[in-house]
Amino acid sequence: MIVVRDIKNKFHIPCCHINIPSPCRISHAWLQCFVTPSYQMASAKRHKIKCLSLSNTQHSLDTIWFLLQACRYLIVAAKSGDVNTAKILVKCTNDNCSIDDATSSTPLILAADNAHVDVVRVLLEGGVNAERDNTFQWTALHYAAYYGHLDVCRLLLDWGVNLGPLNTWKDTPLHLAAWRGHLSVVKLLVERGADVRLKNDQGQTASDMARIEGYGGVAEWLDSLSSG
């Protein structure tokens, strides 16, 4: 990736038309890009680029450059809630994108984190792996549960994601929802089959985590299930 960027900057190309070879199978097989220090690219929507699939064949330098930008703008679209851009770019990236920070979070995780339910739906329909986690083993469901995004949680569960993925600290989404006091999310997860007895690496159940953070109502509701 660095090599591609260096080559582009070496020649100080202010504007270029990139030919996209057949492996990406893109209608309107070109796009206009503006090579600046921040590697800006003209909006894919503007050029009505429609990506169908990627093969595993060797891509040319131009294709690699396009894919770098496709990933970059898919990440921006996921964070900002830009449904149309996400729909255009998701098929080009082959589910290989992640944000360049300590978490290495995917577009799906970023969309779930920011409660962009329509983008989450577009990404799922585009074929991304709903179970893919980040550096800390948080999945999209972990983030949606932690932040109390009920609609996102419901969509992910309807899509069939695992109810009990474990993050680095062995917390399930139920642990995180209880920890932040999101009773509606807690009830949804339990209704779908989440195990209230599971303990994290500190030996804490979801009820314990709710009680520690002062969410007595959540803890009591969970405790009533265990005693019932």
Image (cartoon, rainbow, N blue to C red):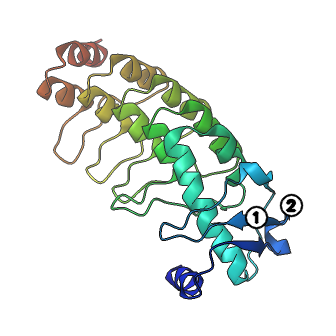
Name the quarter where the C terminus is drawn.
top left
Q: Amino acid at mark 2?
A: His
Q: Is residue 184 above or below residue 105?
A: above
Q: Is residue 162 at least partly visible in the picture?
A: no
Label 1 and label 2: CA atoms lie apart by 8 Å
Q: Amino acid at mark 1?
A: Leu
Q: Is residue 218 left or right of residue 95?
A: left
Asked which secondary structure carries label 1, the reply is strand
Q: Position of residue 165 (x, y in %)?
A: 42, 45
Q: Is residue 178 left or right of residue 132?
A: left
The residue shown at (48%, 38%) is: 112
37 vs 84, nearest the viewer: 37
Asked which secondary structure carries label 2, the reply is loop
Residue 219 figure quarter: top left
Q: Position of residue 113 (x, y in %)?
A: 43, 39
Q: Which mark is residue 89?
A: none
Q: Is residue 129 at least partly visible in the picture?
A: yes
Disc 2 crowd, CA 10 A, few/some/many (<14, 14-19, 20+): few
Q: Position of residue 53 (x, y in %)?
A: 78, 61
The residue wearing badge 2 is 28
The residue shown at (36%, 58%) is: 103
Number of marks: 2
Q: Which mark is residue 31?
A: 1
Q: Position of residue 100 (x, y in %)?
A: 42, 64
183 vs 102, nearest the viewer: 102
The residue shown at (26%, 22%) is: 181
40 vs 100, nearest the viewer: 40
Disc 1 crowd, CA 10 A, few/some/many (<14, 14-19, 20+): some
Q: Is residue 104 left or right of residue 52?
A: left
The residue shown at (44%, 47%) is: 139
User: Is label 1 in contact with label 2 (beta carbons under 8 Å)?
Assistant: yes
